[in-house]
Image (spheres, rainbow, N blue to C red):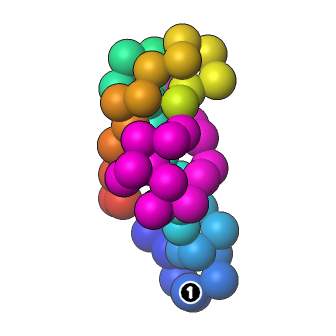
Amino acid sequence: MVKFPEAEARLFKSVFVCRKCKSKVRAPNLKVVQGKISCRKCNSRVLRPIKRK
């Protein structure tokens, strides 16, 4: 889908999706793994990386 690396970085780098309410959050990978980042909508800490097509 993505033709060049700048667009891929903009769309997929450090973007996570909440598993409960499906909202997107952009945050550093290390903080998500440590559990310091929560969802803005539902305050859940269960996040997954965005899927690449």
Residue for badge 1: 5
Quadrant of the snapshot with the C terminus = bottom left
| The image quarter in which residue 23 lies | top right
Eyeballing the image, is 42 above or below 13? above
Q: Residue at x 35, y 30 (%)?
A: 46
| Span highlighted in magenta in the image | 23-37
In this picture, is 53 found above or below 8? above
Image position of 41 (left or right of 18)? right
Name the residue at 50% across, 54% down: 31
Secondary structure category for the residue under label 1: helix
Q: Residue 8: image x %, image y %?
A: 54, 74
Residue at image x 55%, y 27%?
39
| Frontmost residue, 46 versus 6 | 46
How far across and down, in percent of the image, does residue 18 sit?
43, 29
Q: Is residue 35 magenta?
A: yes
Q: Between residues 4 and 18, which one lies in front from this camera angle?
A: 18
Residue 48 in the figure: left or right of residue 16: left
Q: Residue 21: percent from the left, percent from the top?
A: 46, 16
Res. 40 in view = yes
Numbered circles on residues, count: 1
Front residue of this view, candidates 44 and 50: 44
Is residue 12 in sight in this rendering?
A: no
Residue shown at 65% from the left, 68% from the top: 10
Q: Is residue 10 left or right of residue 46?
A: right
Return the residue found at the far top: 42
Q: Amino acid at mark 1?
A: Pro
- Taking 49 as reference, is 52 above or below it? below
**Quadrant location of the N terminus in the rendered image:** bottom left
| Residues packed near mark 1 inside 10 Å, few (<14), some (14 to 19) or many (20 plus) | few
Give x and y (percent) for residue 19.
35, 26
